[in-house]
Image (tube, coloured by chain):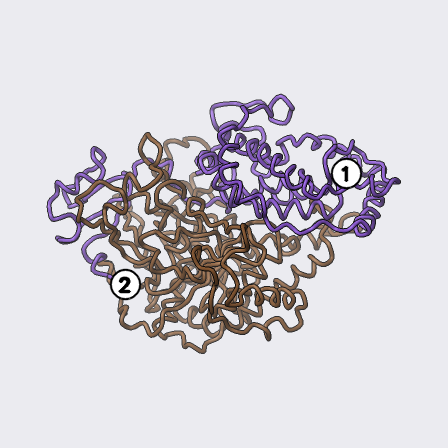
Amino acid sequence: MTDFSIMEQYEFHVTTQGLELVERAEDPQSSGGGTGALAALGGAMVARSAKGALTTLNRNRNRSRNRNRNRNRNRNRNRNRNRAEFGTQDDLGIQEPWEERAKLYELRAEWMDLPMPLPPSLPELREQAVDLLKKQVLLARPQFAMRREEILNEADLELSRYLRPYGIETHGGYEATIHLMLVVLALTDEIGLYYKARWNVPRPNQIEPRLRPFLAAPAHASYHSNHAFQSFAIAFVMSRIVPEHPGSTQLFLSARRIAENREWAGVHYACDTEAGHMLARMILPVLEKVLEKNMLAAQAEWF
Amino acid sequence: MRPYSIKRKQDALWHLIALGTLTKAHRPDGWSPDDICKPARVAMIDTSVAMDHPNLSAAIRRDLAFDLFSTRLGAFPGLPEQKEIGDLGLGDAQALVAGLPGCKALLCELMARLAPDQPPQMGTLQPAASPVFSGHGTAIAGLIGARPARVPYSQAHIDGPADGQLPLPYCGADPTCEIVPISTNFDADPEQMILAFLYAELVRADVIVLPRGIEDPFRTAPQLHAIDFLGQPLGELTAPCPIPEAQRELWSELAELILKISHRRPVICAAGNAHEEFGIYPANLASEDNGVISVGALNAKGWPSSYSPEEGLTVWAPSNDSEQFDSGEVRLNPERLAEIRYGVPPVNDNHKYSAFGIISTDVPGPGGYVATPFDMPEREEGLWEYGSYFCDFGGTSAACAIVAGFMALGRGLGQIPADADGIAAKAWLLSKCQPVRPELPNVMVPHLHAMPFEPSDPDEPDEP
């Protein structure tokens, strides 16, 4: 049953100082009656107004602004610090995330046996390789110059494609967000290799010799695509941090483009892309635990 | 710096007084919790919710909370200890998917997943429902159905007398309803949204609320698909990835499904926060012959919020405002004009600006929208102060959540009959609306007693 007596005795006001709890009438349940007990609520932070305000807290207005992310997508862009544009190999250097890796392995049982589907059979892979041959023919045409350039740029998973949907590619003030993305890339690279080794699926050009990959096929197995897995993992993590930001959905599209570019390059089947997406979706609850502090730090840059 | 008005305090529940659900003394206005025949059920398709929030714990149906973020066919984050989900008391949706083969196949999979002997989660695959990253859903749930609560100081980990209770005098538009959170990710994925709507149908929600958009590649910006460029629709040419035919059909089926469901129960959608023409998808599906309700935002002065779409909406409801400084409108906070100094035209709409926001529930402790105001990290458990229970919210998300709670209250009080379909429920809502101003006859605002909107932040009288 809804207890409206609380509403009759107290109310909240919003003031320039924050949320103010105001007592309308004496309430024996609240504090044992005395004002001294109320003052203990927030120590030095507590104020008591002449009109009966009990506490005046939550002073940091910057932390409690409205949340209309959609129309404030690039808020806080004008930070004082300037940052060099990310995207070069040098910028990808972070300290080895040993704490996060340690936590990841503490939770090993939660991610070592996720219900991934078995990879397609060899005949099914040969069928999928036909589509890759078609892409190979198209990629050589002049109108696909932009895609060729993208494939080359994305070979080393540079960050611009993840930052651009949020409009923070060339703006300072998002160091924790960028750091988070780099840590996600590092952890998912390792998780991905574990799953790849389980099935050891041959690369497309091993199945279909007429396929001439645009990039050198990496030395590890094909299923799933780690580019897909890592890119979608960043998208799912950001989807938890700033779900209402329009860039969050755009990031999924960007991740899909990155993943499909690996098919155009002839190094992955379409099923690798889908499996990478699937694994990224399933790993999110584990990443949320492992990276909680990193994610909170990143979130603080947006609120 | 958030531009709270320095001229007047804001009642944290001004939006409920404006809707006529509460009196200025914060008592139910003309109704009583005892009048509720049966609590209305609100299915909330959004992010996860901090289910243990003291103002929300009695409102959330933990047994029905459903997560599609990480699990394709859904997991039950509120049932971590149970081996089986048990009988959920589901309804029948077979007739709904007739003629929608993709939806029919998904319903078949979903029904198998929801069998009583199924586990809450699939093996080691966990739901993505950590309260820490549940800010949006927690704020939405609070506006719909938060209850006033007391929390022991010891539970809040706030310093206070051992036997004392901290009062939290906050409530949603319908503090008697029950909320079924259906959490999703923000991937452009029609299958996930179809499953979410089917689940909302299966749990027999009285009201479905969607305080977000859906990134349908064909319906989000339909005008781009009408532009022929180089012999192809511009929307197709600029798509980051080609849309497979099967997915194209699923997007179409999703749109049809939403309309079909809206005939059974109202589907309340946020209209968007960027002054979109006719609102975002699927709010832009709203029309007279369906039960989709597109909700715009109205500020505390009684003007449409500067960011709110204006055309094609069903109703407007209280929310916050934002500054606008472009050729469409100049609406700046008069209290900070001195900061702007240059370029403010003498004829402007600054008088329309309201600094009032919408207060709602927030993730307690770390996470959510409000972090600690102290110069130290949040406690890993407990709070530094009660402000962490609440946040300042807004947008048409807030407005549509408030309308969802309002309609839930109408259903709970029996004003919307139990057998009313989505269109009848929408008609009830419209019967409660009045134009906000004579010069804005299309801007209709609901009031429980069909009274005109009364500004909570009225204009100051002109100085002599």
At x 17%, y 50%, the residue is: A30
Given the current orientation, which residue lies at the most extreme right position?
A210
Q: CA distance from mark 1 to mark 2?
A: 60 Å
Placement of the N terminus of chain A among the 4 image quadrants: bottom left
- The x and y percentages for residue B168 are 26, 51
Q: In front here: A63 or B448?
A: A63
Residue B307's place in the image compared with B249, above or below, is above
Q: Secondary structure at mark 2?
A: loop
At x 41%, y 32%, the residue is: B340
Residue under circle 1?
A: A267
Q: How many marks?
A: 2
Can residue B437 be seen in this snapshot? no
Given the current orientation, which residue lies at the most extreme left position?
A34
Q: Amino acid at mark 2?
A: Thr
Local packing at callout 2 (Cα closer than 10 Å; few below 14, some 14-19, many 20+) is some
- The x and y percentages for residue B250 are 66, 60
Can residue A154 be seen in this snapshot? yes
Residue under circle 2?
A: A2
**In screen coordinates, is B121 left or right of A45?**
right
At x 33%, y 60%, the residue is: B58
Q: Colour of chain B?
A: brown
Please tell me in which quadrant of the rendered image residue B2 appears.
Answer: top left
- The x and y percentages for residue A182 are 57, 31
- Disc number at residue B147? none
Q: In front here: B390 or B200?
A: B200
**In screen coordinates, is B283 left or right of B158?**
right
Local packing at callout 1 (Cα closer than 10 Å; few below 14, some 14-19, many 20+) is many
Placement of the C terminus of chain A among the 4 image quadrants: top left
